[in-house]
Image: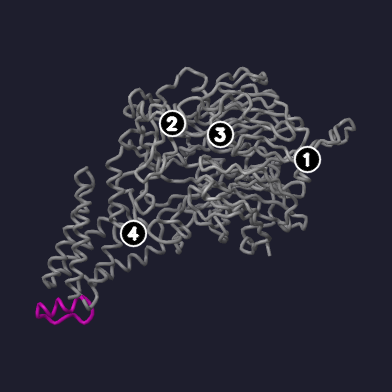
Amino acid sequence: MLNKLTSIVIAIIGIAMLYMGGQLLLIGGTPFYVVMAIGLLATAITLFRNKKIALSIYAVLMWIVLLWTLYEVGFDKWQWIPRGDIIGLIGLWLAMPWVVRPLYRAAKVSPPRKFHPFLGTTVAVVIALVIGLMFYDPYPQAGDITTKRNTTETDVAGNDWTAYGGTTNGLRFSTLNQITKENVNNLEVAWTYHTGDIRDADKDATEYTFEATPLKVNNSVYFCTPHNEVHALNPETGELKWKYQPAKDRSYLQQHQTCRGVSYYEAPAAEINDTAASPAMCRKRIFNATTDAKLIALDADSGKLCADFGNNGMVDLAANMGTIRPHALMQTAAPLVAGNLVIVGGSVMDNGYNSGNPSGVIRAYDVNSGRLVWNFDPATPENTQPIANGESYPQDTPVAWATLSADLKNGLVYVPFGNASPDELGINRDANSNTEKFRDTLVALDLTTGAFKWRFQSSKNDLWDRDNPSQPSLLDIDYQGSKQPVVILPTKTGNLFVLNRLTGQPVYPINQVDVSTKGGVPGEKFSPTQPVSKLNFIPEPLSEKSMWGLTPFDQMACRIDFKSLRYDGNPWTPATEQGSIVFPGNIGVFNWGSVAIDPQRQILIASPVRLAYKYNLIKRTPETADKRLFTKEGTPYWNENFDGDYAIHIQQMASSLGIPCIAPPWGRMVGVDLTTGKTEWLRRVGTTKNLKTTFLPGRFPIGFPMGMVAHGGPLVTAGDVVFHGATADNFFRAYDINSGKLLWQTELPAGGQATPSTYLGADNKQYVVIAAGGHGSLGTKGGDAVVAYRLK
């Protein structure tokens, strides 16, 4: 009776596999699942008839599956899971004595003492291989970086962390070396602070994220929360000094409810001693740019608004922008304080409207008065004089939503312009306009006047949402025997462009590669080439065998998706109405977390992401021009492009279980020797623990080290340690910068999708601090914690 029930279960699995495998075969996919289904059905039929040959048939099937798995993916254990888990479990069950003995008795043959010889041996071989694979991973690339430290580099963070990236050069590096790779295991929690700023699921945006990098300056720790509260803490105890709480603008329509950091300004000593200066003037200021488009100046000592800045401490960034639709203009990045200027870009709603989107103007304000000093708009790059009252900046120009960088010595500010909305549609673009010249372009401006110096376009005619999302990093490198001042620009495509920061000329070679130019939608035009840097982490092209899952069934579903959707084997596959695979997708290989660089040893650390997305263009009709569009599940699309030719539906390429269709790793960490441009080591980062899934209640309890998505940047120190949160498993980790070896890890109270910072406390101890509040889109655990660590 038990064997008949077993045969029925195997038959059901075989029929389901034959159905899905047949679908896959009919659209040009692998025939193997049909072969596997036939083997399962043959086993089920003979087992139901009580024939012991069923065991031999199944053993042959297991060997076929094993050889096929080795042929497709070698010894990558994570890719063995969907190909062999169900087959292996059935084989183990069939090899058990309670299955084997009845079959032998029915054949009137003495049963073996233990197992069926053929099947038992096969199962034993598979078990031995699986156990062996537990200790082997073919993916990581081992290496060791041996460059020597040169301490003459001075424009870096030390005892304080005074700007979003440490300093205005955006390196995320500190000269502190009290915490080393030898003692980092002795880190413990110094303090935990809770902001009290928690998402209201009924009112707040889904994209609610605590991504702030805390500053430490003026003997205080400063940071902002998703609702643009600013908190000042005691660096050694985490005790609250003051808190600025604006009115909360809660709206589920807010595309991004986040604040990545605040900025600090301290008046020079000469100005402080100037008796003519206003006694009401804030000598030390914290600047915060808000999601409702305000630039706010606070007294760094008290948290009160600086009355002499703008209109009672505020500058309205909606000024001169013309008509702005609700939530269409926002600020998410930390403003740049450089010299006596505070400089901001902006962010707009992606694909919200076909036209009438706010300008991407860059504006520089006097840090004391809030007076507009200069403005650089991509539509009129030659006119940087402050705009006149009553005039408006041209709309629908590229925006720079990432934090800017500045070379104070050479008087340059670096602006990573991204796309202009609508991001994935270019039917109405004018290739000869200034707007197109500045789309996805790194621009160098004169810090004092905003005058244009040079530009470099990282993506041509961007139709994939390939903004430049990262803060550029500035340093000098010794490349090919000569010292060069460079700016390094990480991109969503995976390029790391290394340019001379004074001229914009490439330092590392850049090739123009041929890409897809046909298809898409009528009227669309594509650039025939795209730039690819010698230093890049563009993922390897996908194939059908790249598809993944937890079982053969969700893997087959992903394979069917892969064969059904358009994919041209490169990151520039056109979006279509029928559906296309865009890899990497709009989250990018690199995003706002940027990279971290030790300038003294010229080592770059990055955490590139591998995720594929499905892009579907949806034809607008006169009847739906201004109407919301909804998915089959009844939820609205976020990229609706009202009054446009097409809306766009973007979703991660994932199975019905919510698991990425592409095989892991989805998150990696790399170490690059910038003197050679060589990637010296590469490893997976993050585990499956705490992941939110659709097939289990709660969160996944086991931490398989597959390599998880990391949203947030690394920090490097002169102690040769890399600190990194960001992964979707809520862990905070430390790595050896030379080899990538994991040195220490601890579980945070919530998702740590933020970039950490480090500082020296008044107690002469080095602290490392990170925001742990979760990330709405990644689905990590939400919270409101800021956690600081120090040595025991």
Lower sequence index among marks 1 and 4: 4
**Residue 683, can we see it?**
yes
Q: Which mark is residue 347?
A: 3
- Does the stretch in magenta take in 102? yes
Location of residue 386 by image quarter: top right
Mark 1: amino acid = Lys
Q: CA distance from mark 1 to mark 3?
A: 27 Å
Mark 4: amino acid = Ile
Residue identifier under label 4: 81
- Does the stretch in magenta take in 402? no
Lower sequence index among marks 4 and 2: 4
Lower sequence index among marks 4 and 3: 4
Mark 3: amino acid = Ser
The residue stretch that appears in magenta: 99-115
Q: Secondary structure at mark 2?
A: loop
Q: CA distance from mark 3 to mark 2?
A: 16 Å
**Residue 722, can we see it?**
no
For the point 52% across and 31% down, the residue is: 418
Give the percent coordinates (x, y) of residue 400. Answer: 56, 32
Q: Which mark is residue 284?
A: 1
Q: Which residue occupies the foreground of this view, 377 or 645?
A: 645
Give the percent coordinates (x, y) of residue 250. Answer: 57, 44
Q: CA distance from mark 4 to mark 3?
A: 42 Å
Mark 2: amino acid = Asn
Q: CA distance from mark 4 to mark 2?
A: 40 Å
Residue identifier under label 2: 641
For the point 31% across and 48% down, the residue is: 558
Give the percent coordinates (x, y) of residue 44. Answer: 16, 65
Residue 44 versus residue 786 in the image, above or below: below
Q: CA distance from mark 2 to mark 1?
A: 43 Å
Residue 107 versus residue 133 in the image, above or below: below
Lower sequence index among marks 2 and 1: 1
